[in-house]
Image (spheres, rainbow, N blue to C red):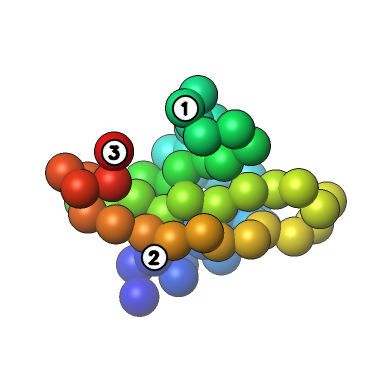
Amino acid sequence: MRILLALTRYGETGEGDVKRLTDREGLCRLRVGKRRVFFDLDVPGTTRIHGFDNRGEAY
């Protein structure tokens, strides 16, 4: 549920711990506790989620 709330908050306000990934072209990551959500923003107004993982296994 925390992931859904964080994604909703980011989508509505742009707030959240988001960084662009340098090793994966075009992807961003959103940090939600110990989880990382990987997504892109290719289409304006649309967030496409590529996956999520635990912090230690994500990179």
- The mark found on residue 23 in the picture is 1
Please state the horizontal and vertical placement of residue 58, each as a whole percent of the image. 28, 46
Mark 3 and mark 1: Cα distance apart in space: 10 Å
Q: Which residue is mark 3?
A: 59
In front of the other: 30 or 10: 30
Q: Is residue 14 above or below residue 50?
A: above
The residue tagged 2 is 3
User: Could you tell me which residue is drawn at 53 percent across and 40 percent down?
Assistant: 28
Viewed as shown, does residue 23 lie left or right of 8?
Answer: left
Q: Amino acid at mark 3?
A: Tyr
Which residue is rendered at x = 70% and y = 48% of the image? 41
* Residue found at the far left of this picture: 56
**Residue 33 is at least partly visible in this image:** no
SS type, badge 3: loop
Image coords of residue 9 (percent x, y): 55, 58
Dot 2: within a 10 Å radius of its alpha carbon, few (fewer than 14), some, or many (20 or more) residues?
A: some
- Which element carries disc 1, helix, strand or loop? loop
Work out how far the residue at label 2 is from the one at label 3, CA to CA, in angstroms.
Answer: 18 Å
Q: Is residue 27 above or below residue 51?
A: above
Q: Earlier in the sequence, mark 1 or mark 2?
A: 2
Classify 10 Å Cα crowding around label 3: few (below 14), some (14-19), many (20 and above): few
**Tag on residue 4?**
none
Outermost residue to the bottom: 1
- At 35% from the left edge and 75% from the top edge, which residue is drawn? 1
**Disc 2 residue type (three-letter):** Ile
Asked whether 37 or 8 is in front, the reply is: 37
Q: Depth check: 47 or 14 in front?
A: 47
Position in image of residue 31 (x %, y %): 36, 46
- The correct choice, above or below, for 2 with respect to 45 in the image is below
Q: Is residue 29 left or right of residue 54?
A: right
